[in-house]
Image (cartoon, rainbow, N blue to C red):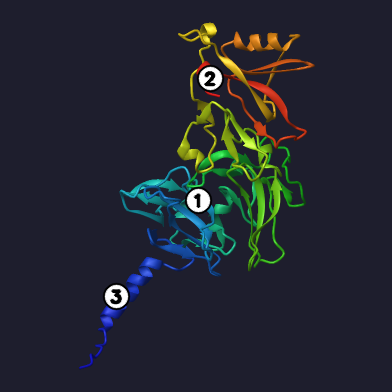
């Protein structure tokens, strides 16, 4: 016998629709009295950008409010509200417009993040609304009056129409700061913006500069609003412009400064070197050293640099068995930053000058004299064999490290 389907009661259908609406939210606007919680998002009117709670990478206990491009397989986040204050999943959380007119993120009914608007009775209007625009800007407004906007508080991405500069009235810098690593949006090693001392210096000089009594800033636009373009300050400290092209092209790199990743100052931290060869890992530790944090370096965060595998003897320059610290020659390498020049006339004397100084970690000698380095070695670059930029220096290591070579 066949089976017959039975129509669902109308009230069950309505309940399901209400639940679906609650979960997806779907609109571009968050009004006073509404809230956005986990699993809900705002979608810009043209479906270009989406805003909601997200957890980057493999973390399941760090959540953020962010904005990302909607229709991409891989999430490309362009803004993070609470980048330095992640939310734990121990308690429920929500984004809402508070009674004082501020946009706030609440966790366990406590304010985790706020727009921190100055006290103003007009900001408590019930007509306040927060809207996600197709430009990627998230604005808090009262009618046509914009009270706060995410474009004034960028993270690592600069979108068309946004500003980089200085708000003189608020005494607030608008600058980009890289993520800490690929799974942590907190403030990283690198920042870019205008000179906060008041000059118009910026390493991209074009006619997008505006200066008036209220602010100094750079901005840019695209000739066709359907074109997706973004500047990003990436984990390597490089400032890039990328534009999307449909089909096999994907994101096209239009501009990168500095052009070479190894031109970024101290990219690989102390005792780490940057590989000029793009086919090699971006950073590696010098011989006898290891990453301070394997977890961080695996996520392209080399800010911690490298540490010695074996401590130097230094004092008296001998170990219990009479061994002495020694040196290994570093080939095809740039010289470290901040050398000290010594008036010494031979390579042997230069070596002894370093060996007899506990803080000395490296030396170099050429026909023009002796150079030594104290403490951390920074800004090292590894060249391909035979590169004209290569120079040699001698790295100090413990005797046991040298014996193992």
Reading the chain from its start, which is encountered first: label 1 or label 3?
Answer: 3
Give the image location of residue 107, x and y in percent.
35, 49
Dot label at residue 403:
2
In this orientation, which residue lies closer to the viewer: 74 or 324?
324
Q: Which residue is mark 3?
A: 15
Image quadrant in which the N terminus is located: bottom left
Give how far apart the Cα atoms at labels 2 and 3 are. Answer: 75 Å
Q: Which residue is mark 1?
A: 80
Numbered-mark total: 3
Give the image location of residue 163, x and y in percent.
64, 51
Give how far apart the Cα atoms at labels 2 and 1 are. Answer: 50 Å
Give the image location of residue 41, x and y in percent.
44, 63
Image quadrant in which the C terminus is located: top right
Dot label at residue 45:
none
Give the residue drawn at x 31%, y 50%.
Answer: 91
Give how far apart the Cα atoms at labels 1 and 3 are. Answer: 34 Å
Reading the chain from its start, which is encountered first: label 2 or label 1?
Answer: 1
- Tag 2 near tag 3, CB within 8 Å: no
Direction bottom: furthest residue:
1
- Is 297 placed above or below 72 here? above
Nearer to us of marks 2 and 1 is 2
């Amino acid at each position: 016998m066949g089976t017959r389907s039975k129509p669902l009661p109308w009230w069950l259908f309505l309940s399901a629709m209400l639940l679906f609406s609650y979960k997806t939210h779907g609109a571009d606007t968050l009004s006073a009295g509404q809230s956005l919680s986990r699993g809900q998002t705002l979608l810009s009117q043209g479906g270009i950008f989406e805003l909601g709670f997200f957890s980057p990478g493999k973390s399941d206990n760090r959540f953020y409010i962010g904005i990302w491009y909607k229709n991409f397989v891989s999430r490309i986040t362009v803004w993070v509200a609470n980048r330095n204050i992640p939310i734990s999943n121990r308690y429920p959380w929500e984004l809402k417009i508070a009674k004082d007119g501020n946009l706030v993120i609440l966790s366990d009914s406590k304010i985790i993040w706020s727009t921190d608007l100055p006290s103003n009775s007009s900001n408590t209007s019930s007509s306040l609304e927060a809207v996600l625009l197709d430009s990627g800007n998230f604005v808090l407004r009262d009618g046509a009056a914009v009270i706060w906007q995410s474009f004034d508080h960028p993270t690592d991405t600069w979108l068309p129409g946004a500003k980089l500069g200085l708000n003189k009235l608020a005494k607030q810098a608008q600058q980009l700061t890289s993520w800490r690593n690929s799974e942590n949006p907190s403030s990283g090693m690198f920042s870019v913006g205008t000179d906060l001392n008041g000059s118009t210096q910026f390493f991209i000089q074009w006619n997008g500069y505006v200066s008036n009594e209220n602010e100094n800033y750079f901005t840019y636009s695209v000739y066709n609003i359907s074109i997706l373009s973004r500047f990003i300050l990436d984990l390597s400290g490089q400032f890039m412009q990328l534009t999307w092209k449909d089909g096999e092209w994907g994101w096209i790199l239009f501009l990168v400064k500095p052009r070479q990743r190894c031109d970024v100052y101290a990219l690989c931290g102390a005792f780490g070197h940057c590989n000029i060869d793009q086919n090699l890992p971006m950073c590696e530790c010098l011989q006898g050293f290891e990453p301070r944090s394997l977890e961080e370096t695996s996520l392209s965060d080399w800010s911690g640099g490298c540490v010695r595998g074996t401590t130097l003897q230094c004092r008296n320059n001998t170990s219990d068995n009479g061994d002495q610290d020694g040196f290994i020659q570093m080939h095809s390498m740039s010289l470290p930053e901040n050398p000290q020049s010594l008036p010494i006339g031979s390579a042997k004397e230069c070596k002894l000058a370093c060996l007899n100084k506990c803080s000395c970690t490296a030396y170099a000698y050429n026909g023009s004299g002796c150079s030594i380095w104290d403490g951390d070695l920074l800004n090292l670059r590894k060249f391909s064999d035979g590169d004209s930029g290569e120079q040699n220096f001698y790295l100090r290591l413990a005797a046991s490290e040298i014996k193992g070579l």
